[in-house]
Protein backbone atom coordinates (compact mmCIF):
# COMPACT_ATOMS: atom_id res chain seq x y z
CA UNK A 1 0.00 0.00 0.00
CA UNK A 2 2.90 2.40 0.66
CA UNK A 3 5.82 0.75 -1.12
CA UNK A 4 8.27 -1.80 0.25
CA UNK A 5 8.98 -1.87 3.98
CA UNK A 6 12.03 0.11 5.16
CA UNK A 7 14.70 -2.41 6.21
CA UNK A 8 17.81 -0.21 5.97
CA UNK A 9 19.39 1.31 9.09
CA UNK A 10 20.12 5.03 9.43
CA UNK A 11 23.31 6.29 7.78
CA UNK A 12 25.75 8.58 9.60
CA UNK A 13 26.07 11.88 7.74
CA UNK A 14 28.36 13.74 10.11
CA UNK A 15 30.06 13.47 13.51
CA UNK A 16 31.22 16.54 15.41
CA UNK A 17 34.02 16.15 16.46
CA UNK A 18 34.83 13.63 13.71
CA UNK A 19 35.53 9.96 14.38
CA UNK A 20 39.19 9.24 15.28
CA UNK A 21 39.81 12.80 16.44
CA UNK A 22 43.19 13.31 18.16
CA UNK A 23 43.76 15.56 21.19
CA UNK A 24 40.05 15.22 21.92
CA UNK A 25 38.83 17.61 24.65
CA UNK A 26 35.16 18.14 23.89
CA UNK A 27 32.37 17.61 26.41
CA UNK A 28 29.80 17.03 23.68
CA UNK A 29 29.63 14.89 20.55
CA UNK A 30 26.82 15.21 18.00
CA UNK A 31 26.02 12.57 15.36
CA UNK A 32 23.81 13.53 12.40
CA UNK A 33 21.95 10.88 10.39
CA UNK A 34 20.02 10.77 7.12
CA UNK A 35 16.68 10.10 8.86
CA UNK A 36 14.89 10.51 12.17
CA UNK A 37 16.44 8.35 14.89
CA UNK A 38 16.05 7.43 18.56
CA UNK A 39 18.16 5.55 21.10
CA UNK A 40 16.79 2.33 22.56
CA UNK A 41 17.97 0.64 25.81
CA UNK A 42 21.06 2.84 25.95
CA UNK A 43 21.99 1.60 29.43
CA UNK A 44 21.98 -1.95 28.12
CA UNK A 45 23.89 -1.31 24.91
CA UNK A 46 26.37 1.52 25.54
CA UNK A 47 29.92 0.41 26.40
CA UNK A 48 32.62 3.01 26.95
CA UNK A 49 36.25 1.89 27.13
CA UNK A 50 38.12 2.74 29.24
CA UNK A 51 35.17 2.77 31.63
CA UNK A 52 34.54 6.31 33.01
CA UNK A 53 33.47 6.89 36.60
CA UNK A 54 30.39 8.81 35.41
CA UNK A 55 28.47 7.30 32.50
CA UNK A 56 27.90 9.73 29.59
CA UNK A 57 24.40 11.02 28.93
CA UNK A 58 23.05 10.06 25.48
CA UNK A 59 19.97 11.72 23.98
CA UNK A 60 18.31 11.84 20.57
CA UNK A 61 16.36 14.57 18.76
CA UNK A 62 15.07 14.41 15.20
CA UNK A 63 18.08 13.29 13.08
CA UNK A 64 20.73 13.68 15.78
CA UNK A 65 22.17 11.72 18.69
CA UNK A 66 24.20 13.62 21.31
CA UNK A 67 26.76 12.38 23.84
CA UNK A 68 27.26 14.57 26.90
CA UNK A 69 30.56 13.59 28.56
CA UNK A 70 30.23 14.10 32.32
CA UNK A 71 33.64 12.83 33.45
CA UNK A 72 37.20 14.07 33.03
CA UNK A 73 38.89 11.91 30.41
CA UNK A 74 42.37 10.53 31.05
CA UNK A 75 45.28 12.10 29.11
CA UNK A 76 46.91 10.25 26.20
CA UNK A 77 44.14 7.66 26.14
CA UNK A 78 42.08 6.16 23.32
CA UNK A 79 38.34 6.03 24.08
CA UNK A 80 35.75 3.98 22.23
CA UNK A 81 31.99 4.50 22.54
CA UNK A 82 30.28 1.28 21.48
CA UNK A 83 26.54 1.72 20.91
CA UNK A 84 25.66 -1.86 19.96
CA UNK A 85 22.15 -1.74 18.45
CA UNK A 86 20.99 1.29 20.47
CA UNK A 87 20.67 3.79 17.57
CA UNK A 88 17.58 2.98 15.47
CA UNK A 89 15.37 4.70 12.95
CA UNK A 90 12.02 6.00 14.15
CA UNK A 91 9.66 4.19 11.75
CA UNK A 92 10.84 0.57 11.72
CA UNK A 93 13.42 0.48 14.56
CA UNK A 94 16.15 -0.65 12.17
CA UNK A 95 19.38 -0.51 14.22
CA UNK A 96 22.87 0.51 13.16
CA UNK A 97 24.63 -2.66 14.21
CA UNK A 98 27.69 -2.18 16.44
CA UNK A 99 27.98 1.57 15.84
CA UNK A 100 31.32 2.70 17.36
CA UNK A 101 32.93 6.12 17.83
CA UNK A 102 36.66 6.32 18.65
CA UNK A 103 38.73 9.33 19.75
CA UNK A 104 42.03 9.92 21.55
CA UNK A 105 43.02 12.52 24.13
CA UNK A 106 46.60 12.05 22.93
CA UNK A 107 48.47 12.19 19.66
CA UNK A 108 47.60 8.69 18.35
CA UNK A 109 44.83 6.06 18.32
CA UNK A 110 45.63 2.79 20.11
CA UNK A 111 45.26 0.02 17.54
CA UNK A 112 46.03 -3.29 19.26
CA UNK A 113 43.38 -6.03 19.20
CA UNK A 114 42.64 -9.15 21.22
CA UNK A 115 39.99 -11.85 20.81
CA UNK A 116 38.78 -15.08 22.38
CA UNK A 117 35.74 -17.11 23.29
CA UNK A 118 33.55 -17.75 26.34
CA UNK A 119 31.61 -21.01 26.78
CA UNK A 120 29.41 -22.13 29.67
CA UNK A 121 31.40 -24.88 31.38
CA UNK A 122 28.36 -26.81 32.64
CA UNK A 123 26.53 -27.08 29.32
CA UNK A 124 29.00 -26.26 26.54
CA UNK A 125 26.56 -23.60 25.35
CA UNK A 126 26.89 -19.81 25.05
CA UNK A 127 25.35 -16.93 27.00
CA UNK A 128 25.69 -13.93 24.68
CA UNK A 129 24.54 -11.53 27.42
CA UNK A 130 27.93 -11.90 29.13
CA UNK A 131 30.77 -9.41 28.71
CA UNK A 132 34.50 -10.01 28.34
CA UNK A 133 36.48 -7.66 30.61
CA UNK A 134 40.12 -6.57 30.76
CA UNK A 135 41.52 -5.09 34.00
CA UNK A 136 44.71 -3.04 34.00
CA UNK A 137 44.64 -3.29 37.82
CA UNK A 138 46.30 -6.68 38.43
CA UNK A 139 45.16 -7.00 42.04
CA UNK A 140 43.14 -10.24 42.34
CA UNK A 141 40.40 -8.37 44.20
CA UNK A 142 39.94 -5.68 41.51
CA UNK A 143 37.12 -7.59 39.83
CA UNK A 144 35.15 -7.44 43.12
CA UNK A 145 35.43 -3.70 43.72
CA UNK A 146 35.92 -1.78 40.48
CA UNK A 147 34.78 -1.74 36.88
CA UNK A 148 37.06 -3.04 34.12
CA UNK A 149 39.31 -0.93 31.90
CA UNK A 150 37.94 -2.45 28.68
CA UNK A 151 34.77 -4.42 27.94
CA UNK A 152 33.57 -6.32 24.88
CA UNK A 153 30.33 -8.08 24.07
CA UNK A 154 29.99 -11.74 23.16
CA UNK A 155 28.44 -12.66 19.83
CA UNK A 156 26.00 -15.54 19.37
CA UNK A 157 28.92 -18.01 19.22
CA UNK A 158 30.52 -16.69 22.41
CA UNK A 159 33.32 -14.86 20.61
CA UNK A 160 34.61 -11.51 21.85
CA UNK A 161 36.81 -8.98 20.09
CA UNK A 162 38.64 -6.06 21.70
CA UNK A 163 39.78 -3.17 19.48
CA UNK A 164 41.76 0.01 20.12
CA UNK A 165 43.67 -1.47 23.04
CA UNK A 166 46.74 0.03 24.65
CA UNK A 167 49.73 -2.26 25.08
CA UNK A 168 50.21 -3.65 28.57
CA UNK A 169 49.44 -6.47 30.98
CA UNK A 170 45.84 -7.20 31.96
CA UNK A 171 43.69 -9.69 33.82
CA UNK A 172 40.92 -11.20 31.69
CA UNK A 173 37.45 -12.10 32.98
CA UNK A 174 33.96 -12.76 31.66
CA UNK A 175 31.14 -11.16 33.64
CA UNK A 176 27.37 -11.28 33.65
CA UNK A 177 26.05 -8.36 31.60
CA UNK A 178 22.75 -8.18 33.46
CA UNK A 179 22.21 -5.23 35.76
CA UNK A 180 25.10 -3.20 34.36
CA UNK A 181 27.33 -3.81 37.40
CA UNK A 182 30.38 -4.99 35.40
CA UNK A 183 31.82 -6.51 38.59
CA UNK A 184 31.85 -9.94 40.24
CA UNK A 185 29.78 -9.53 43.39
CA UNK A 186 27.57 -12.61 43.62
CA UNK A 187 28.66 -16.30 43.70
CA UNK A 188 25.49 -17.22 41.78
CA UNK A 189 26.55 -14.88 38.95
CA UNK A 190 28.06 -16.31 35.76
CA UNK A 191 31.80 -15.67 35.81
CA UNK A 192 35.02 -16.80 34.12
CA UNK A 193 38.69 -16.00 34.58
CA UNK A 194 41.95 -16.60 32.73
CA UNK A 195 44.58 -18.61 34.58
CA UNK A 196 47.32 -16.04 33.95
CA UNK A 197 47.73 -12.40 32.98
CA UNK A 198 47.29 -11.39 29.33
CA UNK A 199 50.11 -9.43 27.70
CA UNK A 200 48.54 -7.26 25.01
CA UNK A 201 50.95 -6.80 22.11
CA UNK A 202 51.13 -7.50 18.38
CA UNK A 203 51.48 -11.27 18.98
CA UNK A 204 48.82 -11.89 21.64
CA UNK A 205 46.98 -15.20 21.09
CA UNK A 206 43.23 -15.84 21.51
CA UNK A 207 42.08 -17.14 24.90
CA UNK A 208 39.29 -19.60 25.72
CA UNK A 209 37.30 -19.00 28.93
CA UNK A 210 34.82 -21.33 30.65
CA UNK A 211 32.09 -19.56 32.60
CA UNK A 212 30.41 -20.98 35.69
CA UNK A 213 28.18 -20.02 38.59
CA UNK A 214 29.92 -21.02 41.80
CA UNK A 215 26.57 -21.37 43.58
CA UNK A 216 23.16 -22.20 42.18
CA UNK A 217 20.64 -19.38 42.46
CA UNK A 218 17.88 -21.49 44.00
CA UNK A 219 15.15 -20.00 46.11
CA UNK A 220 14.89 -21.92 49.39
CA UNK A 221 11.65 -23.69 50.25
CA UNK A 222 9.88 -21.74 52.95
CA UNK A 223 9.16 -23.67 56.11
CA UNK A 224 6.78 -21.11 57.60
CA UNK A 225 3.00 -21.36 57.29
CA UNK A 226 2.75 -17.69 56.34
CA UNK A 227 4.53 -18.40 53.04
CA UNK A 228 1.62 -20.47 51.71
CA UNK A 229 -1.74 -18.93 50.94
CA UNK A 230 -4.55 -21.09 52.26
CA UNK A 231 -8.19 -20.92 51.29
CA UNK A 232 -10.79 -21.47 53.99
CA UNK A 233 -11.88 -25.09 54.24
CA UNK A 234 -10.84 -28.48 55.62
CA UNK A 235 -7.16 -28.82 56.57
CA UNK A 236 -6.27 -31.67 54.20
CA UNK A 237 -2.72 -32.73 53.40
CA UNK A 238 -2.15 -32.36 49.64
CA UNK A 239 0.37 -34.25 47.49
CA UNK A 240 1.04 -35.37 43.93
CA UNK A 241 2.72 -38.56 42.70
CA UNK A 242 5.02 -39.63 39.87
CA UNK A 243 2.38 -42.10 38.69
CA UNK A 244 1.12 -41.00 35.26
CA UNK A 245 -2.25 -42.24 34.03
CA UNK A 246 -2.09 -45.11 36.51
CA UNK A 247 1.33 -46.24 35.27
CA UNK A 248 4.71 -46.28 37.05
CA UNK A 249 8.06 -45.96 35.27
CA UNK A 250 10.28 -49.07 35.54
CA UNK A 251 13.47 -47.02 35.67
CA UNK A 252 12.67 -44.59 38.49
CA UNK A 253 11.32 -44.70 42.04
CA UNK A 254 7.78 -43.71 42.89
CA UNK A 255 7.65 -40.24 44.48
CA UNK A 256 5.13 -38.28 46.55
CA UNK A 257 5.60 -34.50 46.30
CA UNK A 258 4.20 -32.07 48.88
CA UNK A 259 3.65 -28.32 48.28
CA UNK A 260 4.27 -27.63 51.99
CA UNK A 261 7.19 -29.21 53.90
CA UNK A 262 6.34 -32.07 56.23
CA UNK A 263 6.78 -31.52 59.95
CA UNK A 264 6.21 -35.08 61.11
CA UNK A 265 6.83 -38.15 58.96
CA UNK A 266 6.74 -41.90 59.69
CA UNK A 267 8.06 -44.03 56.82
CA UNK A 268 6.74 -47.23 58.43
CA UNK A 269 3.20 -46.07 57.67
CA UNK A 270 3.72 -46.25 53.90
CA UNK A 271 3.69 -49.79 52.49
CA UNK A 272 4.06 -51.15 48.97
CA UNK A 273 2.08 -54.36 48.38
CA UNK A 274 0.83 -56.60 45.63
CA UNK A 275 -2.87 -56.81 44.72
CA UNK A 276 -3.44 -59.22 47.64
CA UNK A 277 -1.95 -56.65 50.08
CA UNK A 278 1.18 -58.73 50.63
CA UNK A 279 4.10 -56.38 51.40
CA UNK A 280 6.83 -56.25 48.74
CA UNK A 281 10.21 -57.25 50.20
CA UNK A 282 13.15 -54.90 49.64
CA UNK A 283 11.08 -51.72 49.44
CA UNK A 284 12.54 -48.61 51.09
CA UNK A 285 10.79 -45.32 51.88
CA UNK A 286 12.72 -42.07 52.50
CA UNK A 287 12.26 -38.29 52.57
CA UNK A 288 14.58 -35.65 51.11
CA UNK A 289 16.26 -32.83 53.02
CA UNK A 290 13.65 -30.26 51.94
CA UNK A 291 10.95 -32.43 53.57
CA UNK A 292 8.83 -32.11 50.41
CA UNK A 293 9.57 -35.33 48.47
CA UNK A 294 9.00 -38.87 49.72
CA UNK A 295 10.65 -41.60 47.63
CA UNK A 296 9.52 -45.24 47.39
CA UNK A 297 12.34 -47.37 45.99
CA UNK A 298 11.64 -50.82 44.60
CA UNK A 299 13.00 -53.18 41.97
CA UNK A 300 9.93 -52.92 39.74
CA UNK A 301 8.68 -55.88 37.71
CA UNK A 302 7.30 -55.08 34.30
CA UNK A 303 3.55 -55.08 33.57
CA UNK A 304 2.72 -55.74 37.23
CA UNK A 305 0.00 -54.30 39.46
CA UNK A 306 0.90 -52.79 42.84
CA UNK A 307 -0.79 -50.96 45.69
CA UNK A 308 0.69 -48.21 47.86
CA UNK A 309 -0.96 -48.07 51.29
CA UNK A 310 -0.67 -44.71 53.07
CA UNK A 311 -1.96 -44.64 56.65
CA UNK A 312 -3.98 -41.66 57.85
CA UNK A 313 -1.40 -40.42 60.35
CA UNK A 314 1.76 -41.03 58.27
CA UNK A 315 2.59 -37.29 58.24
CA UNK A 316 1.56 -33.72 59.02
CA UNK A 317 2.94 -30.65 57.27
CA UNK A 318 4.07 -27.33 58.76
CA UNK A 319 0.47 -26.06 58.45
CA UNK A 320 -0.64 -29.00 60.64
CA UNK A 321 -2.57 -30.49 57.74
CA UNK A 322 -2.99 -34.27 57.64
CA UNK A 323 -4.96 -36.92 55.76
CA UNK A 324 -8.63 -37.20 56.73
CA UNK A 325 -8.45 -40.95 56.04
CA UNK A 326 -6.05 -43.57 54.75
CA UNK A 327 -5.13 -43.51 51.04
CA UNK A 328 -4.59 -46.44 48.69
CA UNK A 329 -2.91 -45.92 45.33
CA UNK A 330 -3.39 -48.67 42.77
CA UNK A 331 -1.11 -48.64 39.73
CA UNK A 332 0.59 -50.78 37.14
CA UNK A 333 4.18 -50.74 35.87
CA UNK A 334 5.13 -50.25 32.24
CA UNK A 335 6.14 -53.06 29.87
CA UNK A 336 9.74 -53.46 28.72
CA UNK A 337 8.49 -52.93 25.17
CA UNK A 338 7.56 -49.38 26.20
CA UNK A 339 11.29 -48.66 26.25
CA UNK A 340 14.05 -48.72 23.65
CA UNK A 341 17.54 -50.18 23.91
CA UNK A 342 20.51 -47.97 23.05
CA UNK A 343 24.03 -48.67 21.83
CA UNK A 344 26.28 -45.63 21.39
CA UNK A 345 29.88 -45.59 20.18
CA UNK A 346 32.17 -42.62 20.88
CA UNK A 347 35.36 -41.86 18.95
CA UNK A 348 38.16 -39.91 20.71
CA UNK A 349 36.77 -40.74 24.14
CA UNK A 350 40.29 -41.58 25.31
CA UNK A 351 41.14 -37.85 25.29
CA UNK A 352 38.87 -37.35 28.32
CA UNK A 353 40.18 -38.39 31.74
CA UNK A 354 36.95 -39.39 33.49
CA UNK A 355 34.11 -39.18 30.93
CA UNK A 356 30.51 -39.06 32.11
CA UNK A 357 27.71 -39.34 29.53
CA UNK A 358 24.80 -36.96 30.22
CA UNK A 359 21.32 -37.23 28.69
CA UNK A 360 19.59 -33.84 28.51
CA UNK A 361 15.95 -32.87 28.01
CA UNK A 362 14.63 -29.31 28.23
CA UNK A 363 18.10 -28.15 29.32
CA UNK A 364 18.05 -30.50 32.32
CA UNK A 365 20.27 -33.54 32.85
CA UNK A 366 17.77 -36.38 33.23
CA UNK A 367 20.31 -39.23 33.43
CA UNK A 368 24.07 -39.70 33.52
CA UNK A 369 26.48 -42.64 33.35
CA UNK A 370 30.23 -43.02 33.81
CA UNK A 371 31.80 -44.26 30.59
CA UNK A 372 34.32 -47.06 31.03
CA UNK A 373 34.64 -47.90 27.33
CA UNK A 374 33.98 -46.18 23.96
CA UNK A 375 30.74 -48.17 23.61
CA UNK A 376 27.78 -47.52 25.90
CA UNK A 377 24.77 -49.85 26.01
CA UNK A 378 21.56 -49.73 27.99
CA UNK A 379 18.81 -52.33 27.66
CA UNK A 380 15.92 -50.14 28.80
CA UNK A 381 15.81 -46.42 28.06
CA UNK A 382 12.86 -44.03 28.03
CA UNK A 383 11.79 -43.02 24.50
CA UNK A 384 12.28 -39.44 23.38
CA UNK A 385 14.76 -37.01 21.88
CA UNK A 386 17.86 -36.25 23.93
CA UNK A 387 20.80 -33.89 23.76
CA UNK A 388 24.05 -35.62 24.72
CA UNK A 389 26.95 -34.11 26.64
CA UNK A 390 30.26 -35.54 27.84
CA UNK A 391 31.46 -34.30 31.23
CA UNK A 392 35.21 -34.34 31.85
CA UNK A 393 34.79 -35.36 35.48
CA UNK A 394 38.26 -34.51 36.74
CA UNK A 395 37.66 -35.48 40.38
CA UNK A 396 35.69 -38.60 39.36
CA UNK A 397 32.68 -37.87 41.60
CA UNK A 398 30.08 -38.38 38.89
CA UNK A 399 28.78 -34.81 38.80
CA UNK A 400 29.78 -31.42 37.38
CA UNK A 401 31.73 -29.17 39.76
CA UNK A 402 31.96 -25.38 39.37
CA UNK A 403 35.13 -23.34 39.65
CA UNK A 404 36.27 -21.09 42.50
CA UNK A 405 38.05 -17.84 41.72
CA UNK A 406 39.38 -17.37 45.27
CA UNK A 407 41.08 -20.78 45.02
CA UNK A 408 42.03 -20.21 41.35
CA UNK A 409 40.17 -23.42 40.50
CA UNK A 410 38.68 -23.72 37.03
CA UNK A 411 35.31 -25.48 36.52
CA UNK A 412 34.97 -28.95 35.06
CA UNK A 413 34.21 -28.81 31.35
CA UNK A 414 31.23 -30.32 29.54
CA UNK A 415 31.53 -31.13 25.83
CA UNK A 416 28.23 -30.93 23.92
CA UNK A 417 27.62 -33.63 21.32
CA UNK A 418 26.23 -32.04 18.19
CA UNK A 419 24.00 -34.88 16.99
CA UNK A 420 20.88 -35.55 19.06
CA UNK A 421 19.72 -39.05 20.02
CA UNK A 422 16.16 -40.06 19.18
CA UNK A 423 15.18 -43.17 21.20
CA UNK A 424 12.24 -45.16 19.80
CA UNK A 425 10.25 -47.59 21.93
CA UNK A 426 10.65 -51.34 21.29
CA UNK A 427 13.62 -50.61 19.04
CA UNK A 428 17.40 -51.18 19.04
CA UNK A 429 18.71 -47.61 18.79
CA UNK A 430 22.36 -47.37 17.65
CA UNK A 431 24.47 -44.28 16.89
CA UNK A 432 28.11 -43.25 16.38
CA UNK A 433 29.58 -40.00 17.70
CA UNK A 434 32.92 -38.32 17.04
CA UNK A 435 34.02 -36.08 19.90
Image: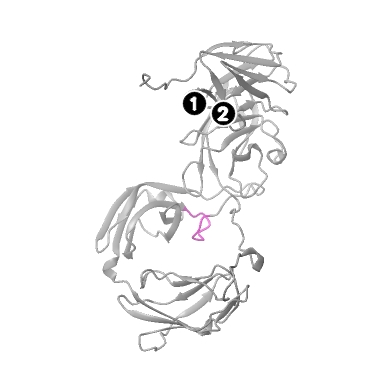
Residue 182 visible within the image: no
Q: Position of residue 377 (x, y in %)?
A: 32, 61
How many badges with numbers are in the image? 2
Q: Which quadrant holds the N terminus?
A: top left
Mark 1 — residue? 93
Within-10-Å neighbours for mark 1: few <14, some 14–19, many 20+: many
Residue 337 visible within the image: yes
Residue found at x 29% / y 63%? 341
Residue found at x 52% / y 50%? 412
Which disc number belongs to residue 124? none
* Residues at circles 1 and 2 in contact by the CB criterion of under 8 Å: yes
Out of 332 and 198, give the one closest to the viewer.
332
Question: Which residue sits furthest left?
Answer: 427
Indicate the secondary structure of the residue bearing disc 2.
loop
- Quadrant in which residue 175 is drawn: top right
Q: Main secondary structure of the magenta part?
A: loop
Q: Position of residue 78 (x, y in %)?
A: 65, 19
Magenta span: 392-400
Residue 395 on the magenta span: yes
Residue 259 on the magenta span: no
Disc 1 from disc 2: Cα separation:
9 Å
- Quadrant in which residue 99 is drawn: top right
Mark 2 — residue? 40
Q: Position of residue 262 (x, y in %)?
A: 59, 74
Residue found at x 49% / y 60%? 398
| 303 up-or-down from 9: above or below | below
Earlier residue among tags 1 and 2: 2
- Quadrant in which residue 180 is drawn: top right
| 196 up-or-down from 37: above or below | below
Indicate the secondary structure of the residue bearing disc 1.
loop
Q: Position of residue 96 (x, y in %)?
A: 50, 22
| 296 up-or-down from 166: above or below | below
Amino acid sequence: MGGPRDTTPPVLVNANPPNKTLHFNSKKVVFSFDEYVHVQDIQKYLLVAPEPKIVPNVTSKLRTVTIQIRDTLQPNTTYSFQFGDAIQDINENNPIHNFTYVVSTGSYIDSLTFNGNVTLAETGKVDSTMLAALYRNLDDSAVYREKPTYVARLDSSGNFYFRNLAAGTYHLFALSGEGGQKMYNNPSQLFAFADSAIHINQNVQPVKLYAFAQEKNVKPVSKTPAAVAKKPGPKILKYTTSISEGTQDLLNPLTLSFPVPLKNFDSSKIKLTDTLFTPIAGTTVSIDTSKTIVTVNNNWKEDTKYKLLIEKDFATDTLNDSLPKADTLTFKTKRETDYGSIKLHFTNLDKITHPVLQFVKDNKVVDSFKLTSPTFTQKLFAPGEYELRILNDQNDNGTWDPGNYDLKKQPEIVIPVRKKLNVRADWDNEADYIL
